[in-house]
Amino acid sequence: MRFILVLLITSFGATAMAQNNCDKWSHRPQYIEAIKAVAQAEKYEFAELCSLPEVLDIEAQPSHTVTRDGEVIPHVQIQLHMNTKSCLYMVRNADLAITSQRCYSGW
């Protein structure tokens, strides 16, 4: 009986680990396009980035930058969360260019 329980837990755990971190954004095309820009910059295919085992979560949210002249430039902020670090990318809405990126320790 214990063997079956361990087998079930292991099976469901492996299935959960193989999830696609981009599915939750499928209803937000602007976020998907920004994630694609990050994937391209990091030399991954979109589907590959979405299912990398080391990426625990992909966060997307609207953001902006402000120039010295006060011009507001809309962006999407993408964060890739991993075990020991996270990486943040600012993707400009107009042309999907990554205007800044940085990684920081999660410890």
Image: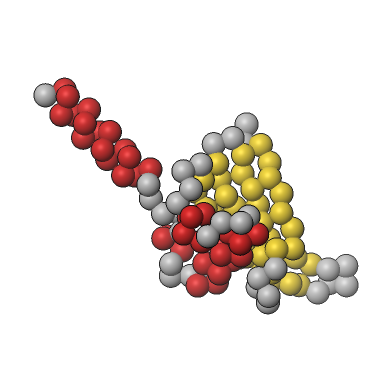
Q: How many marks?
A: 0
The quarter of the picture where residue 72 lies is bottom right
Residue appearing at x 52%, y 67% in the figure: 32
Q: Is residue 11 left or right of residue 27?
A: left
Quadrant of image for the N terminus:
top left
Quadrant of image for the C terminus:
top right
Residue appearing at x 68%, y 45% in the figure: 103
Residue appearing at x 71%, y 54% in the figure: 101
Depth check, front residue: 66 or 83 = 83
Residue 9 percent across, percent down from the top left: 25, 33
Residue sitting farthest toward the left: 1
| Snapshot colouring | secondary structure
Q: In this view, does 71 lie above or below 47?
A: below
Residue 43 percent across, percent down from the top left: 61, 56
Q: Can residue 27 be seen in this view?
A: yes
Residue sitting farthest toward the bottom: 94
Q: In this view, does 10 lie above or below 71?
A: above
Depth check, front residue: 18 or 106 = 18
Residue appearing at x 74%, y 63% in the figure: 99
The quarter of the picture where residue 78 lies is bottom right
The quarter of the picture where residue 81 lies is top right
Q: In this view, does 39 lie above or below 54?
A: below
Residue 92 percent across, percent down from the top left: 69, 69
Residue sitting farthest toward the right: 69
Residue 76 percent across, percent down from the top left: 62, 65
Q: Can residue 38 be seen in this view?
A: no
